[in-house]
Image: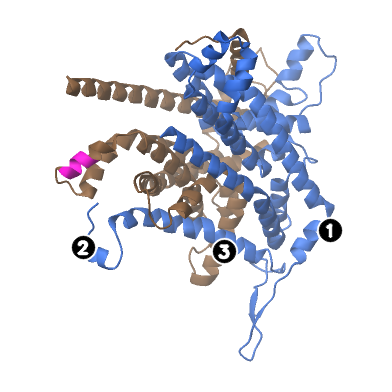
Amino acid sequence: MNYRRSFFITTCLAFGFAFLYIPIFSMVVFSFNASKLVTVWDSANSPTLKWYYSLLHNEEILDAAWISLKVAVINASGAVILGTLAGFGLARFEQFRGRFTLNAMTTAPLVMPEVITGLSMLLLFVAMEQLIGWPAGRGITTMTIGHMTFSMAYVTVVVQSRMSTFDIALEEAAMDLGARPVKVFFLITLPIIFPAILSGWLLAFTLSWDDLVISSFTSGPGASTLPMVVFSKVRLGVSPEINVLATLTIGAVTLIIIAVALWMARAAKVAAAAATAAAE
Amino acid sequence: MRILPPLSKVGVSGRGLVVTLPYLWLLLFFVVPFVIVLKISFSDVDLAIPPYKPLLEWAGKNSLAIKLDFNNYAFLFTDPLYVHALLNSVKVAFVSTVLCLLIGYPIAYGIARSTPITRNFLLLLVVLPFWTSLLLRVYAWIGLLKANGVINNALLALRLIHEPLNMLYTPFAMYVGIVYSYLPFLILPLYANLEKMDWQLLEAAEDLGCRPWQAFYKITLPLSRNGILAGSMLVFIPAVGEFVIPALLGGPNALMIGRVLWDEFFSNRAWPVASAVAILLLLLLVPFMMWYQSVQARESASAR
């Protein structure tokens, strides 16, 4: 295998990554700018942390962040359970009634425009309230159900693709030795697909934390999430506090992604070492 | 697989139990809602809460009257706004997909041809923006594109322009925003496809006298067909219904169907009209979704 890259491809890579990262860097840099104009550098008073201070004392943003956090954690935990079951079923059971439908239902949310999903969810909740009186009004519960429905589809894809790369002989060996399917799942399958479940949880958390459209449709008065507050501010133009929020988000995401990548690389190394030891 | 004895008698197996929960969940919260949207798209607008009239009504004397109102749909086709918005959304999504392909293909290709360590690092760099809020990344472009924004200030300082360019709230800004936001969705499936490619085929072609671009055109491009289709669909389908990017970057004249639906719902409280728009949009997109699913099925079949 050779890793030759032409000059043209290398140039494309450089420009491509510049395109992806210049907006992100500009938000980080200007979060330290003293000027209220955000993009006009005030060299006399910058860099400064004053917008960091004012963000951390902004009640509206902090309240919204707390709501977003609650929704995202409940959503991610629920979506992981539903998505793992669906991903496991689709990867392991070749034939079952409703396989085609389940497959379609877990693929469609990935590409469905959010305005459609959001509108249809809201209309369901309204109809359910008229019919059975639940959910009474809209708020955190309805938002969480909405988020779980589309983020479980992402978890399904992640778990399913992990399932298709692991050796089914391990499960069969355990069953030959007398383990019941449930025991096999918890002792063999779950530890092996754990990295996928962890990425699925993080993905579901992020999708929910970032979602604007489905939240706006399914939320009620008094339950504004962080993206909803950000959107209403950003509609009026740039704001220094949003740059700070972006910088904090980027920092947190970078740290978590690097930590997970390192942890997974180490786990893979341990697994490889165990495999060679077993082979010898 | 062993089956729990008492449950198996009523036809419930261990397998069944595993998939039943997600199946029922999606049926209730994903499929049933579409039926309700369809139903409400045929109802009358009403000044009530919720703002529509029921389809079924007791007409007295034990008769049930079903009233289907096609006016919402007729309205969509008489007011040129809706058809115009729909066509414009398809155009914007299509052009954005082509732009994403032109930018994303060389990137995916370059990553696939890197050494394993560089490859993982570059992939991390593609994934990182994807994990950062879309809303905040779109917001970043407001700061870059506005009249006294970063790009204009830089061009003015370099004396390349004498007065600021008008970029924000134009179709240009909207295209930049869509291409920027959806690029990782195209790169990742395309990379996954190119990664499996047997590069010796290219070497063989070159040994036989093919020029590099000929080898690319005759070998790499056809072999990566499924990756191109999957990636393009992941950009095109959601982009048609995109709301956030036209609302923030496109300005008041950016006519996109997702935005029309949003305004009908939130500003006009015209739920039946919004539902009719959703059904129309869905009818347009379902063939593409089915195409996407068949491409995915082919990809996973070839992976085995």
Of badges 3 and 1, the one in the foreground is 1
Res. A209 visible in picture = no
Res. B282 visible in picture = yes
Note the chain letter of the brown one: A
Amino acid type at mark 2: Pro
Q: Are marks 2 and 1 on the same chain?
A: yes
On residue A126, which mark appears? 3
Q: Bounds of the magenta span? A: A172-176
Note the chain letter of the blue one: B
Q: Secondary structure at mark 3?
A: helix
Amino acid type at mark 1: Thr
**The residue positioned farthest toward the front in the image shown:** B208
| Residue in the image at 62% along x and 34% along y | B232
Of badges 2 and 1, the one in the foreground is 2
Task: Report the side of A179 relative to B180 (left or right).
Answer: left
- Dot 2 and dot 1 residues touching (CB under 8 Å): no
Q: In the depicted view, which residue is nearer to us: B26 or A94?
A: A94
| Residue in the image at 74% along x and 57% along y | B268
Amino acid type at mark 3: Val
